[in-house]
Amino acid sequence: MASVLIALGGNVGDVRTTFRKAISHICGMAQAAMIARSSDYSTPPWGDEDQDPFINACVEIETDLDPHALLFVMQKVEQKFGRTRNKERQWGPRTLDLDMIAYDDVSFQKPDLTLPHPRLFERAFVLVPLAEIAPDRVISGIRVRDGLASVSTQGIERLPDTG
C-alpha cells in the first residue's frame, strides 16, 4: 500500500460538503483507506486574486493504485463535482481542485503528473493543512513543518469543525 497525500481546494458552492463527498468517492473508487484528514482552512486566493477566498484541506490515504491510476480517479471525482478543466481559467474559481502532493517517496516528471508536487513548498494553503496531519513527513528532502516555517500564512484561518 502506498501512502498518498492529497490537497483539496475549492471556492464555488458548498465546498465543505463537496470535500466530504469527494473524499468518500476517492476512497471508494481507489479502494483506499483514509489515514488522516486535516481541518478545513479559509485561505486567500493564490495566483488569480480577483475571486472569493478558497477552502483548503489535505488528506492522507493508503491505496494499491499506481500514481497514474489514482490521478485518473481524482480527475473523475473533480468532474463529478462540476470541474471542467478545459473551460476554466488558471487558478480561477472552482468547485473542487484535487492535487496529488506526494505518493510514497516516488519522484518523477511526466507531462500529466509530477511527483512530488512541484510547487508544494510555495503554497501555504497546502502546507498549513498538510502540517496538521503530516508535520514530520519529508518530501523532496524537506520536512513539511520546516517548509511551512518558510512561507507566510497571513490570511489563513482554521474553520470550526462541522460536527
Image (spheres, rainbow, N blue to C red):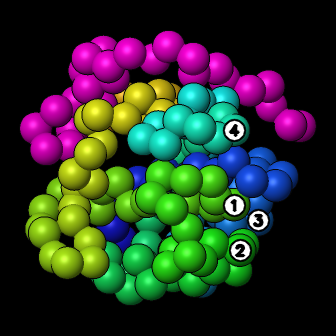
Pointer 1 and pointer 2: residues touching (CB < 8 Å)?
yes
Instruction: Give the residue drawn at x 74%, y 53%.
Output: 12
> Is 107 placed left or right of 103 in the picture?
left
The amino acid on which the numbered mark 3 sits, given as a three-letter code, is Lys
Q: Which residues are magenta?
A: 138-163
Which residue is label 4 attached to?
A: 52
Q: Quadrant of residue 19?
A: bottom right
> Residue 82, which numbered label?
2
> Can you see residue 39?
no
Q: Quadrant of residue 141?
A: top left
Which residue is label 1 attached to?
A: 95
Which tag, 4 or 2, sits closer to the chain's start? 4
Mark 2 Cα shell of 10 Å, populated few (<14), some (14-19), many (≥20)? few
Which tag, 4 or 1, sits closer to the chain's start? 4
> Residue 68, which numbered label?
none
Which of the two marks, 3 or 2, is nearer to us in this view?
Answer: 2
The amino acid on which the numbered mark 1 sits, given as a three-letter code, is Thr
Q: Quadrant of the C terminus?
A: top right
Which residue is label 3 attached to?
A: 21
Horizontal and vertical percent position of residue 112: 27, 78
Cα–Cα gap, marks 4 and 1 = 12 Å
Which tag, 4 or 3, sits closer to the chain's start? 3
Cα–Cα gap, marks 3 and 2 = 13 Å
